[in-house]
Image (cartoon, helix red, strand yellow):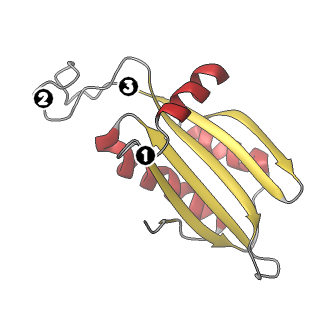
Amino acid sequence: DPGAFEAQWMECAPPVHGCSLELRARAEAMPPQEVIEGALARLGMVCIAAGAVGDVHKAYYAAQLAPSPHSDGEPGGGGALPALPPVELVMLELVVAPAVGGGDALHATATFRTYARPHLRALAQHFGDMLGDMFGATFRAAAG
């Protein structure tokens, strides 16, 4: 549901501490959108929207997270991991644009957002590694 995605995306926007993580990479080429979409779909993410304005490509993806079998099932409970709400999402905004002064190089930014704060870094690393393989680049956490 694009409306639910947009609402949760905005609720997780900075300055909400710990809900958003940005990874960046410099790449020589962008894989075709259908290749990116297919790879993310194999990892459980669906494309919410994708398109380009000029040389800037943007795409939004989401995956529903299941409650952890190691949690106690209660939000804020005492299990090994915090429980997730019943419809917890991990969301991704992927923006690819020409790098400033970089000839044919591209600047790719993958912004991940979720209420599942304890899992944000691991989720971003998981999806970021797959994006890095496709782009032939290493996605690293943005400074600051």
- Going by the numbered disc 1, the residue's amino acid type is Pro
| Disc with the residue nearer the chain's start (3 vs 2) | 3
- Number of residues whose C-alpha sits closer than 10 Å to that of mark 1, classed few (under 14), some (14–19) or many (20 or more): few
- Number of residues whose C-alpha sits closer than 10 Å to that of mark 3, classed few (under 14), some (14–19) or many (20 or more): few
Q: What is the tally of numbered marks visible in this picture?
A: 3
Mark 2 residue element: loop
Horizontal side, residue 3 vs residue 91: left or right: right
| Disc with the residue nearer the chain's start (1 vs 2) | 1
Residue that mark 1 sits on: 15
Mark 3 residue element: loop
Indicate the position of residue 117 as horizontal and vertical percent values: 33, 41
- Going by the numbered disc 3, the residue's amino acid type is Ala
Indicate the position of residue 38 as horizontal and vertical percent values: 68, 42
Relative to residue 117, is residue 101 depicted above or below?
A: below
User: Residue at coordinates 60% horizontally, 71% vertically from top-left?
Assistant: 137
User: Residue at coordinates 58% horizontally, 39% vertically from top-left?
Assistant: 42
The quarter of the rendered structure image containing the C terminus is: bottom left
Relative to residue 72, is residue 51 depicted above or below?
A: below
Alpha-carbon span between mark 1 and mark 3: 26 Å
Indicate the position of residue 97 as horizontal and vertical percent values: 76, 63
Horizontal side, residue 116 vs residue 142: left or right: left
Alpha-carbon span between mark 3 and mark 2: 15 Å
Residue that mark 2 sits on: 79
Relative to residue 87, is residue 133 depicted above or below?
A: below
Residue that mark 3 sits on: 66
- Number of residues whose C-alpha sits closer than 10 Å to that of mark 2, classed few (under 14), some (14–19) or many (20 or more): some
* Residue nearest the viewer, comparing 123 with 109: 109
- Going by the numbered disc 2, the residue's amino acid type is Gly
The quarter of the rendered structure image containing the N terminus is: top right
Horizontal side, residue 36 vs residue 63: left or right: right
